[in-house]
Amino acid sequence: MWALEPAGTPGRSRLLANTPLALIATLGAGWLAAAGLAAAGWLTPSVMRVTALTAAHGGLLAAALAWGAADGGARLPRGCPLVMVALIGAGAIGAVLDPRATVMYLAAPAWLAVLMFRRRLDGLGLAPRVALRPLLVGVAIGALLGGHLLLSASQTLGYALRGGGTAILALWAYDVGANLISAECFFRGALFNRLQRRWSFAAAATVATGAALLRYVVDPLLPKQVEVMAGALFYLTILGAIDCWLLWWSGSLLPGLAASWLFFLAYRLLAIG
Amino acid sequence: MREIAALAVSIVAVTVLGSRAEVEATSLLRHLYFVPVIAAALRFGVVGGGVAAVTAVLLQTPRVFAAIERGGLTSAAAEHLVTCLALVLAGTLVGRLASYAQAQRRRTETLLAVQRALAPDTSLELALGRLRACLAARLAVDDVALVVRQDERLVVAGGTAVAAESLAAEVLATGIPRFLPDVGRGARPRRAFVAPLLVGGDSIGVLAVEREGELSAPERAALSALAAHCGLALENARLASRQRRFAEELAERIASATATKSAFVAIASHELRTPLTALLGFSELLAQRRFEPAEVRRMAETMQHETERLVRIVDDFLDLSRLERGLEPRLSRGAVKVAPALTAAVEMFRRAGSHRLVVECEETLPAIDADADALDRILKNLVANAMKYSPLGSAVHVGARATDHAVEFSVRDAGRGIPAEALPRVFEPYYRAPGVGSARGAGLGLAVVKSLIDAHGGSVHLESAPGEGTRVTFVLPAAS
């Protein structure tokens, strides 16, 4: 038993320890520069979009990888966060050039899967083995929330279901490859995981969910209609809290990822934005 | 699972029933949601109540929001929204109260189980093992250990030892509970909590628990209270065990003392009766018959000898009586010359002629600071003992020699000796070593000797081996 061993009080690093600050600062500076140049009319909105997506999702994933590796006692391959940013950037460029090229986003989760099978991401809750029961619960919750969203949005707000296979596939690829993976890895796998090792579950889940909500509220891609914002906050609060609970219960990020994927799958079926 | 399915079916059934009524019609059917929500809260606590309430709200929102879209926030729609809010409040509040009540019930059951686990007739190791098993089964933690300080060692249940730099050792030293939110590197945080087992403000041990997952502040407070209870229960068990042990020892001692007293009364009666019989017999003979002067003298000497024995026995009784009352023998100390005292003490026994008495003493020995009568009684007791337990005709050596500011006396015989196991008790009152056979005595001689020597500030020592005789040496201070 640990309490009887001579280990003493375990050293706890600072909350923001191991953050790749130089990379994030560079991404932020690039984003600001692109925004400035776009505002001045020297850059097209597409370039601005690529820069923003790369900086936001790439930055979150890079930070998550660095935190997860440090917390799990693993070593990442050299330049791994940079590779992740590059993969997100490639996906963003592909999506701008041709909607069908949005599948390039899937390179990011593929790279994460490789790292996961090499046991480099245990600290993020991404391990090859996951219990079936939490995974099924995650699938059920995602399906339930997604179904409810489809029902209530189409009934209440009158949103129609989206047509066009390629457009939906492109959005799904974006969610799977960048949007969800970056949010889950950072806000649950990294931030919540660190917080729950310092505070109670409730406090950690509240802060992590609040931070994730903030990220979606400031997301320029989210439609700004009040009813959409209110609905997004409603569902994302429930989803975020449940994802925290799934990670806390199972020790794995995969059930939460499954829940989020299914919910966003339903969300993308709605003709919003 | 059956209960969850029943709750889900009832919520869906209420939804189906309510879907036939228009929101604007202010259907009261929606209030039926309270039944499964409160049932879930009572059965599964705050999580169950919350999940059931949110599910009920989610199932109503498509219709409620659609009605608001169509006709605005009418009073009926507002009432519906209030119902939704009331469902969430009822689910969580009732669930919280139910969780609290369940937790209290579990705590009470745990306290009772702790009391049952600590049967007072067991050793501390066994009691701790039982207590740990009881707590492990009831606390729903991954690991539990109990450490209790006993004398200079630590008894551990749930581990082998307590490391000096460990959290348990720290809490044991400070008596302040410690909580660490994560002590592992696993996928889930491993909480560790160590609470002191308190008795009257002192830490007699610790209760340590570890759990992968949440260990909330109320749970930690409950664990601290439980640890304090365990401390008191352990202390009570320990006191009860000690009290019972004392009672058993006391009963044994009383029985032994009673037996010893009975034996003493029998022996003392016999000891008193023997000289009295001799005195009575000789005095009757002298009164009824006429004897030759030499025969009369012999009888008188025998009567004097028996009378002196009677006096010694009575003196021993009196000294013993003072000893048992915690009083020292009365002494009238002064400078006493050793050689004359030795010779005088031995002379009486020499007349009996049963043993060869050898006095080894220099005339130039310094005088001692002692009560002359007490010294005489010490020597006579020791010489009488030596003669009693050695064969007729054998030698008894009585000697004295000077040491640093003292004189060491010794009485040595070649008798049967004393068994090694009896040696520690030979100076106890009434004690008679095994194998003394028909030798006369009340078991008081050596006890009186020791008390007299102690009263002088001297010391006495006895060496003996079966078949090789006994040597008693005692030291008394020289006169200044």
Image: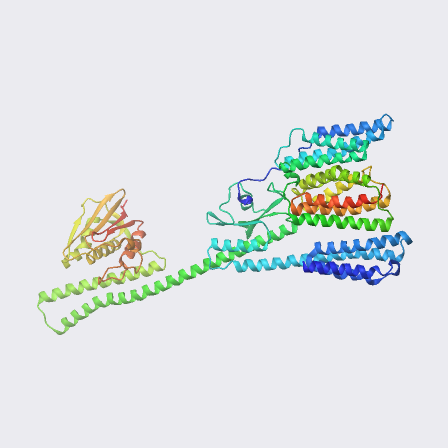
* Of residues B356 and B188, the one drawn nearer to the viewer in this rendering: B188
Q: Is residue B100 above or below residue A266?
A: below
Image coordinates of residue B21 in percent, x first then y, are: 86, 61
Say if residue B92 shows up in the picture. no
Q: Is residue B476 above or below residue A101?
A: below
Image coordinates of residue A53 in percent, x first then y, are: 78, 33
Quadrant for residue A82, please give it: top right
Q: Residue at x 87, y 53 (%)?
A: B66
Q: Residue at x 76, y 57 (%)?
A: B90
Q: Quadrant of the C terminus of chain B?
A: top left
Q: Is residue B397 above or below residue A24?
A: below
Question: Furthest-bottom residue in view?
Answer: B288
Q: For this view, does B54 lie left or right of residue B297?
A: right
Q: For this view, does A60 lie left or right of residue A72?
A: right
Say if residue A86 shows up in the picture. yes
Quadrant for residue A33, please give it: top right
Q: Residue at x 14, y 71 (%)?
A: B285
Image coordinates of residue B329 in percent, x first then y, are: 31, 56
